[in-house]
Amino acid sequence: MSETKFQTHTKLQMTRYFLNQDCRENKKKPQDNCNESASKKLETHKRSKKKPSIKKSQSELEALVTVVKYKRKPWRGRNHEDDRLAAAKVQPPWTRKSKRVPVQDEKLARHSRGEGLSGDGIKTKFYQKKLKKHEADIQFSIEQAARAELLLPEESGFLVADEDELTTQFSQQQIASSVDIASATKHFDLHLAEFGPYRMNYSRNGRFLLIGGRRGHVAAIDWVTKRLLCEVNVMEAVYDVQWLHVETMFAVAQKQWLYIYDNQGIELHCIKRLSKVLRMEFLPYHFLLATASEEGFLSWLDISIGQMVSQFNTRMGRLNLMTHNPYNAVVCLGHSKGIVTMWSPNVKEPLSKMLCHQHPLQSLTVDSQGRYMATAAVDRTLKVWDVRKLEGPLQQYKLHAVASNLAFSQRGLLAVGMGNVVEVYRDCCQKSADRPYLRHRLFKRIGNMEYCPYEDVLGVATDNGFTSLIIPGSGEPNFDALECNPFQSKSQRREAEVKSLLEKIQPEFITLDPTVITDVHIPTLKDKVEAKKKLLFLKPPKIDFQPRNKSGKKKGTVKVAQTKRIVREGQRREFVKTLKETGIDKISSSQEVESCIASVKHKTFNALDRFKPKEKKQEKG
Amino acid sequence: MKVKVLSRNPDYYLRETKRDIHKVPRNYDPSLHPFEGLREYTRALNAVKLERVFAKPFVGNLDGHQDGVSCLGKNPQHLSLLVSGSYDGEVRLWDLPQQKCVRNFRAHDGYVRGITFLPDGQQFVTVGDDKTIKIWKTDLPDWGEEEEPTNTYISKSVIVGVSHHQKEPMFATCGEVCQVWEEDRNEPIRTFQWGVDSLHDVSFNPIETHLLATCASDRSIILYDTRDTGPVRKVIMRLRCNRLCWNPMEAFIFTCANEDYNLYTFDTRKLKQPLKVHMDHVSAVTTVDYSPTGQEFVSGGYDKSVRIFEHGKNHSRDVYHTKRMQRLTCVLWSMDDKYILCGSDEMNIRMWKARSAEKLGVLRPRERSALNYSEALKEKFVSHPQIRRIARHRQIPKHIYHAQKELRTIKLKQKRKEANRRAHSKPGTVPFVSEKKQHVVEEQE
């Protein structure tokens, strides 16, 4: 099949060549017109007629190469900010009408961080210009990022059926036989009949595979080269296995406690505070190992400092369904009442509770960009939800069997495990897919499955081993080496580990919306200053405090005065505190302030008040 | 059927030999870079913490004077040379890179009151309490030659300050009157007086070169035009100004150090009120000097600390102090914008970095880009409370801490009192007066 690959490559190069050609032609066109017009239609093209020939060649040159002219500005001896603004006024080279090839809109949209600010509410011209400059910078960076896509070396995989064929009909053997040898080795089986139902996990860069059998067998493998890193039998039931931030450490949830081993199978830690763990999830940017236990406890262990960040009882019973949202690091749990709950370590209540099905949940998964969540229940339904909106199902499918396992790939392919059958669906979130993209039947029941990051591979752990399936078009073709690098060397790994530890995100930031930190805090400075002022000029209530005369001495001693002062100070502090808590902004309107002060103050006394009827005691109370 | 599966050729992704650098393919797709904001925030937090870790501003100490340092002179041509004068009339020349005194001689009887360099940097002028003005060569005298001034002028009145014209061979002195001298004449060519008994600082404008400003002991600042008209304008303040410094970049801006713990930046075109009131010192401010960029200035005062202010900001960016440093008499910002020098009562001259966390020496390109990146991050997240708290945190001596606390209490009390008075008076009788307007009494022309 190397031939087909070759063909595709040549085609690709051809297209790129043509693309460049087109671009050049596009650029050239106006000048060609100019030349023609200069010779033939002098009347119609007056502009070109006026141009001298030297200018023409200049313009040609400019069309081919973007000539960036930096004109040295006269020095004005002004503020630095002013100079920057003046630079904005002169227009930086990228805001000028560029003669470069325009970037496709969809590419720009991919790199865009949302709409910019228009600068409507800004009063001064100074800040308006400043904002404009800032927006231009952002736009420039987006454009540059979109342009850099041209340099990406790989194209994603695909499987296209001919007219009278369906993609579903191709078996793994057929696919493996028609791809190149290196890719064909990615389809393999591990027959491990003895140590019973397996679970598996891929490392973050997709290079390493960890499998754990219920009856104690744990093995770490470099699955690309098929090199065994370690293989041990922990002589205890194994419920789940999980790689940590690097491939030198992994966690195993055993019968009683959670253990951490290194890549030679040596036990590093036994964490007794995590007992009877059923499922684990690792949050790589927070260095947190989230675990769900048989007794309903949810805990987050910071593996960089070895501290328990949070541990509490969810009061949801046995937790055997767990995943995390890679977009915001929120842990999602599925329950037997058909609900999905989302948890952060900072709140002991779920952040959200979604009733997804009328029946017990069987499996759930969230896609890598945190857009879609797929859930499946025992009534054979499969629903796809928009997790950002936490709203009703986008899609609803009725399957022919109960989906016991679900997995999203990096490019949004959904794998559904039903008993011993794996079906892969494409484009099933926005549109409803009517037939699976690929199907594969295994010999035994599926334990769990996962797509390998940056590869076109789906790993399936079964009751009697592990199977690696080739799913063309599932993996992200171009990795970012500063994020995850499958070809990492030892020194690179060490450096990346240090870097990632330095920018470890604190667990307090785990919320449903991770972009909150870059948003503007709404209460304006003015409000805050006003509130502070009000607090300053509010008078605390006077209290009539007479300390008990314990010693029987005179009343006017220093000690008595001190006690009085201390009590009054305390009272004042209390008053300010209560005001702060009730929210000074709430009593912003002057009436409310007055009423507040009035309630605090003693009532004013008038000499004629004695003739008023006495107040009733009830009113006083 | 057409099929293609991802298959990466390791040759493309691995370096060929061990001498090559590692290949780092990038993909800027935002979906591969989650938690963008949070990670940037964490980086900004680290950057601001590292800045505090590396903030070690003290460079060195120049000791040798037998009495308190009274004035410093900045050479406009040579970075490495510094001239200082002391209370016992001694003048010392220092080699700054080696932190050594290269030459010392007794210039005056009594105080050396002022030092200023000629524009070519080859000679400098000193004035002293003995009513003499002396011009000295910067270079060492030849073998056998005695340490002698090239020129000496004797004034009839007391002289306490001197400033040289930026281009022409002309300098101004102040004392009882303001006098303008030419280098080749023994008598002052002009004398200005505007109804005051004494002037204690004088300064030529470096851009509008004929403009001259003096600080007078009747709490006023007087501007003169040396060409023809003489005294031009005068602004009277609540307390007297000790020192005045022109902005070397903006001709019409100057900053003065005041007795009332504040510094004031004025615009010469509008002296009715200062542009900015710079508050942070807790005692009288005695001296001020601008950086050559005109973006920042440094001040020192009786609170034994040096403060650095940004142009157009009300509060200081940084504060420098040591246990042994006493009241400051003079500060100076070096011409390469990297160092600050301060002379104090206890006979020492101290050298500080202008930006406390800056690395001295050559930066490699990667280092520089990393620093630029962290600067940008700090700017982006500057208003986050955690980051602002760390960036603003300074250890200050106890006496300053207590004085600040006291001042704060006094200010609060005044504010409250004013508010109370306003609340209990007829509306409009107690007007709001802005902080800027409170310190200027009047402007005269």
Image: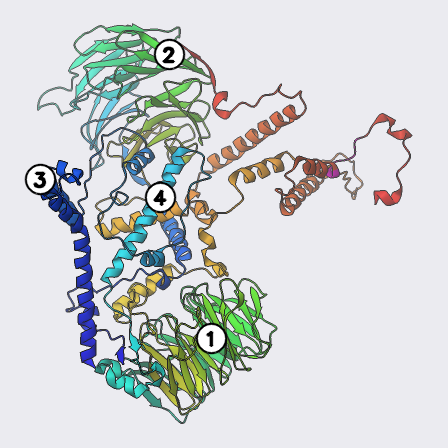
According to the image, label 3 marks what residue?
A: A53
Check disc 4 and report the residue beneath it. A134
Q: Are marks 1 and 4 on the same chain?
A: yes
Image height of B416 relative to B213, above or below: below
Residue A378 or A517: which is nearer the viewer?
Answer: A378
Mark 2 Cα-neighbour bin, 10 Å: few <14, some 14–19, many ≥20: some
Q: Which residue is mark 1?
A: A280
Mark in the foreground, 3 or 1: 3
Q: Say which element carries label 4.
A: helix
Q: Which residues are magenta?
A: A599-604
Residue A318 falls left or right of residue B241: right
Residue A602 sits inside the magenta stretch: yes
- Across and down, in percent, residue A232 comes to 37, 86
Q: Secondary structure at mark 3?
A: helix
What residue sits 76% from the left and 40% below the top? A545
Q: Report the chain holding disc 2.
A: B
One can see residue B320 in this view: no
Find residue A264 and report its image quarter.
bottom left
**Tag of residue A258:** none
Dot 1: element? strand
Quadrant including the C terminus of chain B: top left
Q: Nearer the viewer, mark 2 or mark 3?
A: 3
Residue of label 2: B233
Q: Are marks 2 and 4 on the same chain?
A: no
Which circle's residue, 3 or 1, is located before the other in the chain? 3
Q: In the rendered structure, are the residues bearing label 1 and label 2 in contact, judged by CB atoms less than 8 Å apart? A: no
Q: Amino acid at mark 2?
A: Arg
Cα separation between marks 2 and 3: 62 Å
Is residue B292 within the magenta segment?
Answer: no
Amino acid beneath label 3: Ser
Q: Is residue B4 above or below residue A129?
A: below
